[in-house]
Image (cartoon, grey):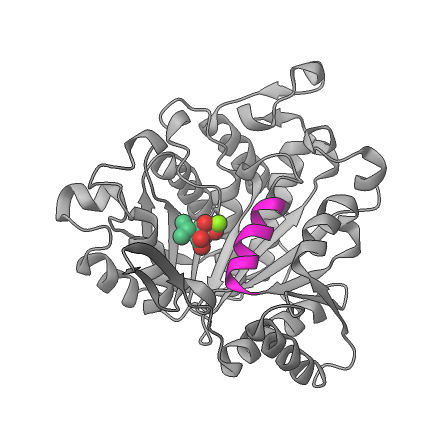
Amino acid sequence: MKKHIAVLPGDGIGEEVMTEALKVLACIAGRFEHQFVTTHGYVGGAAYERFGTHLPEETLSLCRSADAILFGSVGGLVSEQHLDKWRNCEANSILTLRKTFNFGANFRPVKIYPDLKEMSPLKAEIIDRGVDLLIIRELLGDSYFGEHKTFYQDERRIATDVIMYTEDQVAAVAHVAFKAAGGRRQKVTSVDKANVLDSSKLWRAVVHEVGRNYPEIKLEDMLVDNCAMQLIKDPSQFDVIVTTNMFGDILSDAAAVLPGSLGLLSSASINAEGFGLYEPPGGSAQDIAGTGKANPIAQILSTAQMLRFSFALEQEARAIEQSVETTLKAGYRTHDIYNPKQSAATKLVDCQQMSQQILAHLEAVQIAEPVA
Ligand code: IPM
Ligand code: MG
């Protein structure tokens, strides 16, 4: 298979974790006989320095001509947000990409690795029930893309952000969620605030209409405030959670804490044609950029998601995921997942050493013979 990939490392740790993810991609290409043509583009503060914009036209056209986008992270230090380079950087780059390519569904899987149990803030008895859930977040509606306005009335400031959903937007992401649950544990939890919001009443009604096409999938509704509590109290009850843009933003960050580090999480934003953007949702972590402390696993797992969703290379995606799990099982830990109390059983490594271990396992992964 030959595919063109737009590679946008961005800011902070983006560059260093991307370098490691591309080694993994090259290894997959070699072992499974694919050709991945990667072309780098600038985004975020890195783009602002060269082009005076966070998402230059050159980068957009690179993305348009690619088969998938591999994204790092964008944004600067909190203390530097007032600089032009960073002002609105995330919104200008990420939200514009979502809108331009109609990325209506965002996959954020959250799973607690048994070998990293001690890093989770949850009690062992909760983790032992098994935590493996997938948040599917709608990405093109809600207050993100409704009208934003700040104005004066009687010399007092007022600000409004319109929450808007069309039934087609809801139906599209609902289909994605039911299909995803079909390949998992057959359960969808739809999360809304239907006791208050009209947009949530529409959400709930449409998700149920779509659900009738998937009788084998169990559908339940949950209010967002309760869901926030349940994610911490009893996360094993969830398989697929489907929710609105803003609730998904908040709940996915809450759920991201469960495995113990943001550095383990991948994310995939996908449109109706299967074109996608793959990124670690953990942010640019400027405070540790260049120190070797970054965990490359999130970027490496995002690369696996790209192989799975955009190129239908399930075996290759699994090979990467397996190699990550084996590396963790063998005790290798980057700074974010290192627990000094476990130092006898684990080994603290830097970003590059972590990916070297993953690569070593990937080189050894058995490749299934194609069924004749
Ligand atoms: C995310 C981020 C973005 C969002 C920001 C950076 C605009 O928090 O991808 O979750 O709110 O969607
Ligand atoms: Mg977020």
The C terminus lies in quadrant: bottom right
Locate residue 231 relative to residue 67 in the image: left or right: right
Residue 226, percent across and down? 72, 55
Q: Residue at x 35, y 25 (%)?
A: 290
Residue 177, percent across and down? 63, 70
Q: Is residue 365 visible?
A: no
Q: Magenta span has 78?
A: no
Q: Magenta span has 245?
A: yes
**Which of the 4 image quadrants contains residue 175?**
bottom right
Highlighted range, magenta: 244-254
- Which of these two is toward me, 210 or 201? 201
Q: Is residue 82 visible?
A: yes
Q: How many marks?
A: 0
- 125 in relation to 248, above or below: above
- 225 in relation to 254, above or below: below
**Which of the 4 image quadrants contains residue 210?**
bottom right
The N terminus lies in quadrant: bottom left
Residue 10, percent across and down? 31, 44
Q: Residue at x 79, y 55 (%)?
A: 237
Q: Residue at x 47, y 67 (%)?
A: 142
**Which of the 4 image quadrants contains residue 332?**
top right
Q: Main secondary structure of the magenta part?
A: helix
Residue 184, percent across and down? 72, 64
